[in-house]
């Protein structure tokens, strides 16, 4: 069996720890603060990395630990997200949609 990557280890540790009240608000404040600190820096790379980091933190605050699919469920097209096959499965392994007639081969 292959050893999990560093990102997978971080995700597992994050999933195992208990949350605390106001965690989402704290992450949102850190994301906005990061953007405020880096948005007028003279180097474009610092501004870009600050915007990227702030965007990731704000998305994390909005979605929580369950991921973005929970938040997308409230958007007009997001209700279809839960019906999508997992991204790890090849397209030919997804269950066929019986409501769509198929042409004979």
Image (tube, rainbow, N blue to C red):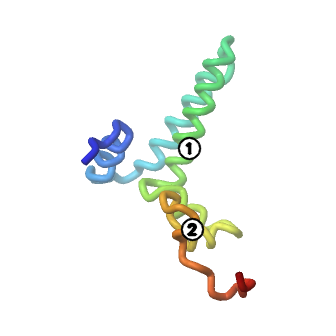
Q: Residue 42 in the image: x percent, y percent?
A: 68, 11
Q: Secondary structure at mark 2?
A: helix
Do the numbered discs 2 and 1 sit on residues whose CB atoms are within 8 Å? no
| Label 2 CA crowd tier, 10 Å (few <14, some 14–19, many 20+) | few
Q: Is residue 37 left or right of residue 20?
A: right
Give the residue number, with chain letter if any, for mark 2.
92
Task: Pick whichever, 73 or 82, lies toward us.
Answer: 82
Q: Is residue 44 left or right of residue 37?
A: right
What residue is at 35 percent from the left and 44 percent from the top? 8
**Among the two numbered marks 2 and 1 on one chain, the one whose residue lies closer to the N terminus:** 1
What residue is at 66 percent from the left and 13 percent from the top? 43
Task: Pick whichever, 17 or 84, lies toward us.
Answer: 84
Q: Residue 64 in the image: x percent, y percent?
A: 46, 54
Residue 89 vertical placement versus 4 (above, below): below
| Label 1 CA crowd tier, 10 Å (few <14, some 14–19, many 20+) | some
What residue is at 59 percent from the left and 27 percent from the top? 50
Q: Residue 28 in the image: x percent, y percent?
A: 52, 43
Q: Is residue 87 left or right of residue 19?
A: right
Give the residue number, with chain letter if any, for mark 1.
58
Name of the residue lying farthest toward the right: 103
Residue 39 vertical placement versus 20 (above, below): above
Residue 93, label in figure: none
What residue is at 58 percent from the left and 64 percent from the top? 91
């Amino acid at each position: 069996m292959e050893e999990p990557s560093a990102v997978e280890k971080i995700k597992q540790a994050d999933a195992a720890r208990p949350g605390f009240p106001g965690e989402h608000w704290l992450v949102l404040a850190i994301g906005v603060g990061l953007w405020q600190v880096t948005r007028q820096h003279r180097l474009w790379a610092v501004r870009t990395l600050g915007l990227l980091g702030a965007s990731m933190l704000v998305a994390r605050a909005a979605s929580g630990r369950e991921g973005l699919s929970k938040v997308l469920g409230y958007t007009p097209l997001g209700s279809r997200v839960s019906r999508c096959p997992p991204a790890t499965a090849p397209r030919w392994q997804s269950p066929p949609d019986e409501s769509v007639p198929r042409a004979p081969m």
